[in-house]
Image: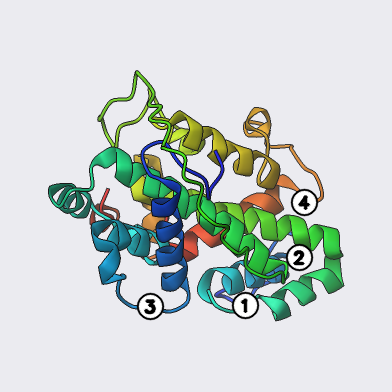
Amino acid sequence: MIASGEPPLVPFGFELAALAQAMGTNWTQPPTVAREALVAVAGPEFAERAIGVAATFQMMNRLLDGVGAPVNKSLHPLAKELGFEPLDIPR
Amino acid sequence: MNLVGPGTLLTATERHQVIRDARAGWAGATVSNQTSGVMGEAAHWLAVDAEGMTEEIVADFESRGLDRLRYLEIVGVVARLSNVDFYVRGIGASEVVLPEPLPDAPNGRLHPDALLTNMWVPTVGRSFAPQVVDALPDEGEAVRDLHEPMYMLMSDMGDNTYGDLLTRAQIEYLAARTSYLNECFY
């Protein structure tokens, strides 16, 4: 949805995706622009809750990748859809 | 278990070094801190490229003296640190400064049923995401102490109608987007 330019079906989807992107790809700077955009449309409490969820998945991703949790075969089609070859994922 | 205190197998000083090495990676270090040895390598790569970890890399760590349970403790420390640091940076606050390390010895408490089965580290029973470090029970509990208030209670995870300030769809959208960026397909 984001790649195609179509609006996400999830309310505030653009702002939420931008927040996750800013938090996940720039590790030295606060996601100020993305956070303020989300605050503007959804309020500060909503933005703080969203930041907490995104931060928690930084933790969960590292836990699962760090211990070698196997990728469930049911998710292989999804990996392909996202451009990854499931058998190349080192799990 | 306090992130900066003594752990199960690592001292507070060792955990502090893990934290410094992970933070250095997030700050732009392209290679691990050589003075931290194999523990520093683990901390660095778990911080910046966890999706690139492989069984072979973990086995190599082991051959150089970092056994699987101490590796698992580093996984737990770096993962929890990422939650804390990304949250703090996210809300625009200052990075939490490390205190002086406590001199207490690690508690050594291991789960008696932990076994090496289908993952690279010992696990307990059929492990779901919030339980993957339960071979170190205090680390496992500490993971859930972050996971529950910042994501949702374990008892709510099966409820697709769950919502609070965010709807379940918004929560999972954030989770999916973050996991996609990290190339985590679990």
Secondary element type, mark 3 = loop
**Mark 4, residues whose alpha carbon is within 10 Å: few (<14), some, or many (≥20)?**
some
* Residue at figure coordinates x 41%, y 60% from the top left: B17
- Residue B154: x %, y % from top left: 62, 31
Q: Which residue is mark 4?
A: B166
Instruction: Residue B66: tell me if it is visible.
Output: yes
Amino acid under disc 3: Ala
Q: Which residue is mark 3?
A: B29
Q: Which label lies toward us, 4 or 2?
A: 4
**Mark 2, residues whose alpha carbon is within 10 Å: few (<14), some, or many (≥20)?**
some
Quadrant where the N terminus of chain B is found in the figure: top right
Q: Which label lies toward us, 3 or 2?
A: 3
Mark 3 or mark 4, which has the lower sequence index?
A: 3
User: Looking at the picture, do discs 4 and 1 lie on one chain?
Assistant: no
- Residue B4: x %, y % from top left: 53, 50
Q: Which residue is mark 2?
A: A12
The chain carrying label 1 is: A
